[in-house]
Image (cartoon, coloured by chain):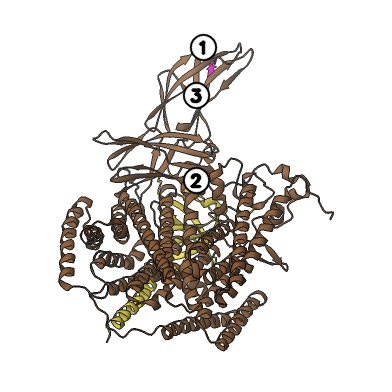
Amino acid sequence: MKTINIIILIVIASAIAIFAGAYSDSSRYSDFATAKQNITTEYHIVGRLNKKKPMVYNPLKNANRFEFYLMDSLGNEAKVIYSEPKPTDFDRSDKVVVIGRFDKPDGDFIANKILLKCPSKYEGETAAK
Amino acid sequence: MKEVVYTGENLLIGNIGHFFVVLAFCTAIFSAVSYFFSANNNDHSVWKKSGRWSFFLHAFAVTGIFVTLFTIIYGHYFEYQYAWQHSSKSLPWYYMLSCFWEGQEGSFLLWMFWNAVIGILLIFTVKSWESPVLAIVCLTQIVLGSMLLGLDVGEIYKIGSSPFSLLREKMATQAPIFRTPEYLAQITDGRGLNPLLQNYWMVIHPPTLFFGFASSIIPFAFAVSGLWVSKYKEWLKPALPWTLVSVMILGTGIIMGGFWAYESLSFGGYWAWDPVENASLVPWLLLIATLHLMLVYKSTGTSIILTYILSIAAFLLVLYATFLTRSGILGDSSVHSFTDLGLSGQLMIFMFVFYALPLFAIVKDKRQKLILNLVYWSFFVLNIIIGIVNKDANTFTILKWIDIAIFLAITCWFVIRLYQTFPLSRTEENFKSRELWMFIGSLVLLLSAFHVLLVTSFPVVNKLFGTKIAVPNDTIPYYHFFQLPIAIFIGFLTAIGQYFKYKTSDSKTILFNILKTFIVALILSAVCVFIFEIYEPKYMLLLLAGIYAIVANLVYIFDALKGKMNVAGGSVAHIGFGFMLVGILVSSAKKEVISINQTIDYGKSMDAKAKRENMLLFKGSSIRMADYEVTYKGDTLIGPNTFFKVHYKGIGNNEEFTLEPNAQISNNQLNANPDTRHYLTHDVYTYVSNIPDRNKQNSEPWSASKTQEISVGETITTANGTVTFESIDKNAKPEELRLKDEMWGANLKINANGKIYSAKPIFAIADKSFYTIEDEVKEAGLKFQFYIKAGENGKVSAFLEISERPPIRDFIIMKAIVFPYINLLWGGVILMIIGFSISIIRRAKDYRRTLNTRLKD
């Protein structure tokens, strides 16, 4: 077998390994119900803020704790706890992606990261007059 | 409804702008057609001339669009939506340039502008390649120009989005403001530029990056031209210096973006593997691989097929990157993607057209070409029609699979045709040859790009196949699992590669040189392990790879090249790459969040596990962070920015400095920018992550007041602190009050949260009545009223009425990070740019020389 063929085989094998690795280590978009059943796995949950329920951020007590209620796409609601300061622009966004897991099946959702879906980072809100 | 005649609008300038847009679009078409016929008719001189002059006119028109739009922004013509949405009167002129890239129309315009510049440079330098190459450049100009047309087709669909639309046209609903003819007088200012973009890096980063993107058309255009005019190999020489330019500028643009993120975004770093960053990295990796393969081809005549594929793929990936960032598809996965401007369909057409170009170019047989054209374009039209008309989900699913199948078929067909055009060489590859190692290196870069592309494309995959894949929260280890070994491998290749000679080399000399430099690198790395305190094996390996790349290339310059710098471009760039590896490794592996408060116990078990990386700092009080005593000194408002003064004092040394991270605060939302203290060996980086909600604090209700009798010297304990009645001031009348009333004040000393405050509520006696003047200590959350009453027995007693609420205290919540040795990264980048510049000069001279010798022959 020619050297070049062996090299190409190795490259193809690596590409497959990368594909498999990237896929198997990836996370999933899901909902609160699934996340509750699987409290060891991290999930991405897209939801809307429930602005009627309290958003608690009391920096005097703990600067690294922020709590709010999120409604997922299926309409299930959960309390989300985030161990970072309240993200800026949080009040303006209504669609939010939280990444994390439940601490226990009937517990709160512990978010490790929050992605905000503002109207747009660059473009500013679309005119609404 | 009666037609409203608006007053005060300057419509002329917008019409001029529109005229230029249409002119640019038409001249691009005319130029493309002319060049097309010129290329198909052996460089026909009339067609070529007409192509050239219409391109000049086109470049003039593009410049005209640019100037007109700038005039609109500069002159604050807020009747135009673009000026209103992206600028304001207070902007300095250089940030008005940033307005261009805040909006999508402006960034397409920028791209067009660079393409026009590149086109003109190409016209004057590429000689015989002008016709086919410019035809392809013009084709991109047609597509980009269409993005600016703003033509309405029917009720819903429109082609492009014009930057010269009027505000009143753009508003979706008939807003009441536009019922008055003098509406313009009511619009006094624009919405302004996003504060994140008001940064000097944001003035130069996007143009640089866009030049990089735009210049990726050059290798693509040359490769396709090579197939088209059947000069299969001659294009590599003129394309090489341009590919170097492209790699250098795109790389500079990417790293400028990183530096901008580091200097003015508060995510705490220069690279976050964000999809938008990745989308620009992937074409760059491909261009680097292309560059190396071009060099291989130039010296040995091999690797031509992969060179073709990569030159073409790099530009297609730029288009794909544009689609990713502009179509809104990244929505949930990126923090800074654009929202959809309704151009995603057009962007898909863009990709559709350019994907097929190489195939059209390689097929020579007239009948095959005709069939291919018929099939592809009818399929293309079918797609558009179904896309617009059809609302049925099943049809879309079928169409989707047919689309995927056709794209796969095209790709396979193209690669097969390439193999037919360039039969593989029969000789056995030699492991002692430089070209084999460069080939391997290019493949590894390709793997790296494949990985980044794959992960970045998850949202597209989800959309296509209905999956729900997401990048995990721990982004960095997820990427590094593959990227780190690749970086190590590339580092070692960079080190040894140049010691091999093309074709074959002498084993003994190679082995000696490689070993010699390796031993030096090993010793240096061992020292660095202790200096940088890096003990993890994988990081130690990367450190070794980086240092080896530096040492080996440095030795190569002096040993093999005898210090001749004009041919050392590659080695200098490799040294820069080595420094970048080391800098990235040390600054990120050893980056340390120092704003961690060890003294406060947060109690609950969950919080103990939490990151606690942000610290609350009361104004005036100081907290220890790592080796610093950090004090928050207060804030000042300069323009729209609030600057927070954070004072650092080294413990046990004389080091002392004040950082002023700032933020724009609106509706108590914070747009924070960090501030960094730069040292040669490390950076101290600080940003404010939150501040107290002042409105909320001021509107907290007071508790029901409690009144109690009090005598001098007595102390009352409240929930917020203790209050001591120190003395009575019998002449407490404030000077500004010109009243005859007699006023007695209570001198109060308040001890709250470790601080002493004072207050003086007043009891005043008027002619026949009395009243009180309350006093409040906001920081202690206490409000006082003071009364004096005469009791039944004639005894005069003092009463104090106290209300409480949560104290209002000024504080910031901040994060501080120390980045060690980050200057190695920036220094490496600069070296890399220098290396590229040297190579560009060398290769351009090279090309000119061959041109001259050909002329003499």
Q: Which residue lies under the disc numbered 1?
A: B731
User: What residue type is disc 3 on?
Assistant: Leu
Report if residue A25 is visible in the image.
Answer: no
Question: Residues in magenta?
Answer: B788-795
- Number of numbered discs visible in the structure rendering: 3
Residue at label 3? B800
Please tell me the numbered disc located at residue B670: 2
Classify mark 2: residues with Cα within 10 Å, few (<14), some (14-19) or many (20+): many
Residue A87 is left or right of residue B678, and the answer is right
Look at discs 3 and 2 and give the one toward the viewer. 2
Q: Are marks 1 and 2 on the same chain?
A: yes
Q: Nearer the viewer, residue B555 or B267?
A: B555
Q: Colour of chain A?
A: yellow
Q: Quadrant of residue B60?
A: bottom right
Mark nearer the N terminus (3 vs 2): 2
Identity of the residue furthest to the right in this view: B2
Q: Colour of chain B?
A: brown
- Which amino acid type corresponds to the residue marked 2 in the rendered image? Leu
Q: Residues within 10 Å of mark 3 (few under 14, many from 20)?
A: many
User: Dot 2 falls on which chain?
Assistant: B
Tell me where residue B213 appears, x and y as whole percent.
48, 62
From the image, give the main secondary structure of the stretch colored magenta.
loop
Does any portion of residue B223 appear in the rendered image?
A: yes
Q: Is B791 in the magenta?
A: yes
Chain letter of disc 1? B
Q: Residue at x 46, y 50 (%)?
A: A86
Say which of marks 3 and 1 sits in front.
1
